[in-house]
Image: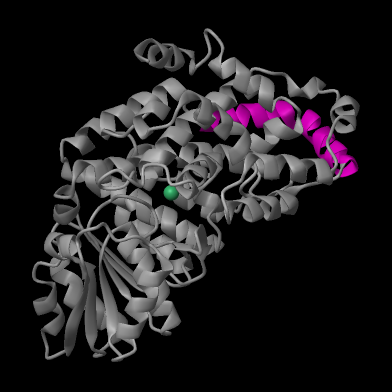
Amino acid sequence: MAEDRISAALANATDTEVVEIGTGALRSVGEVFGRSFGDRPAVIVADEHTLAAGGTGVPEELAAGGRTVVEPYVFPGEPTVYADYRNIETLIDSLRMHDAIPVAIGSGTLNDIVKRAAHECERPYLCVATAASMDGYTAFGAAITKDGYKRTMTCPAPRAVVADVDVLTAAPGPMTASGYADLLSKITAGADWIVADALEVEKIDPRVWSLVQGPLREATGKPAELRDGDAQAMDALIEGLIMSGLAMQAAASSRPASGAEHQFSHLWEMEGLGHDEHPPLSHGFKVGVGTISIAALYQRILQRDLSDLDVDRVASAWPAWDEVERRVRAAHTTPGLDEAAVAESRAKYVGADELADRLALLRERWPEIRRKVQEQLIGPEGLREMLAAAGARTGPGDIGLSMEAFKDSYRRAQMIRRRYTALDLANETGILDECVEELFAPGGFWAGEAAERGARV
Ligand SMILES: [Zn+2]
């Protein structure tokens, strides 16, 4: 069944042609390479850790049949390699010395570095996954830091991906837990897309939607087994992650796999949260906390009956762009992020008239939106349990955020991406601040955590 879903997804993918998932899949790497690139020479790109984790037998497999295998390019294992543009430049210099097809052996960062470097050298590449740690393997674009700002740089996904379940289950537990959290985030990302679709901001493409949401419940259903190293649970996780990537590839956008929970993660990422941890705080752990945060916000929003929203009152209180810009600049002072936040906020800013039209639509469609979003969501308590069972982090304290900084994230994350999410729904209806206050007030979802942390101080 998994294979059927993957082949159906590949039929619509623009870049990826072959995906091999399974126990012992590493042994097929030579065959997959041949199918994708004929007799072109190959070059392995890895770091010291990923080469040890996923490189066993790969050079021999590639060399079988007489293929030329160029001396590998290996980044040091320590300090941890970052997806910094300087690493891409170094790799490009090395790739330009030959015409071999890169074989990336690694997880998120390594794959992103090779994805962009191969693209700049106008070469396709093959990826050997070493951990089920995020959904970027088959995604369009690479998350790269350049001049201090993390952005998605355009580049095609790998032509072929090999994911050996034995290699993935042997990866460090926190990496698997991070991938689980990145996949579970599709629950809130899906809810955001439902809202954006209903308000005619961004239509749902049903084909792309089903790539992500189709296998989602099954793939996230066994967090404890996953943590125990169960091969079937791992198979389902990596399939879900690869399907999410293929969906982003088909959409040429991260919309199918990323909503407000990712905006929390991007905000914290760009402000360097957990960069001093060893290894650095993962994408998935930030996204997991963001997912619980947004599910909790949705709970507050859905409690309200927006079908009797006073559109005139809300629209007349709507700030002009100058005022919004002032607020964005006051909330974001990190160099690079400040200008980006202004540009992103500007891209989604609508004037009071347009807002009134949108809110009128919201009033009319609210019962249907509420029903669909409720059906899509899992409550914040349930998500917290699932993430904890997988071994992921679940609260602001676990990722090193003060309660104050965490609370501010609700308002600040709304400003950094143009994508329409729950944060915009709450902001445009004028209820964002009161919903956030409710979450942190006595009896609110985050109140317990706040009290516990207060007691510890
Ligand atoms: Zn993600």
Q: Is residue 295 above or below residue 263?
A: above
- The colour style of the image is one colour
In the rendered view, does 436 fall on the left or right side of 179? right
The image quarter in which residue 415 lies: top right
Residue depicted at x 57% and y 30%: 408
Residue 1 in sight from this viewpoint: no
Residue drawn at x 44%, y 68% is 11
Task: Report the residue at 65% width, 27% height from top.
Answer: 370
Q: Which residues are magenta?
A: 352-376
**Quarter of the C terminus within the rendering:** top left
The spot of residue 412 in percent (x, y) is: 61, 38
Q: Residue furthest top?
A: 442
Drawn side of residue 300 relative to residue 314, left or right: left
Q: Main secondary structure of the magenta part?
A: helix
User: Is 216 inside the magenta-drawn segment?
Assistant: no
Q: Nearer the viewer, residue 177 or 265?
A: 265
Answer left or right for 373 relative to 73: right
Residue 356 is covered by the magenta coloring:
yes
Please determine whether, in this image, residue 385 is positioned above or below residue 322. Answer: above
Residue 47 picture location, percent across and down = 21, 66
Q: Specify whether residue 81 is in view.
A: yes
Residue 297 percent across, percent down from the top left: 57, 26
Of residue 194 and residue 257, the one placed in the foreground of this image is: 257
- Between residues 369 and 274, which one lies in front from this camera angle? 274
Residue depicted at 75% across the width and 34% down the height:
428
Give the quadrant of residue 221. top left
Q: Position of residue 424 (x, y in %)?
A: 68, 38
Q: Is residue 422 above or below residue 397?
A: below
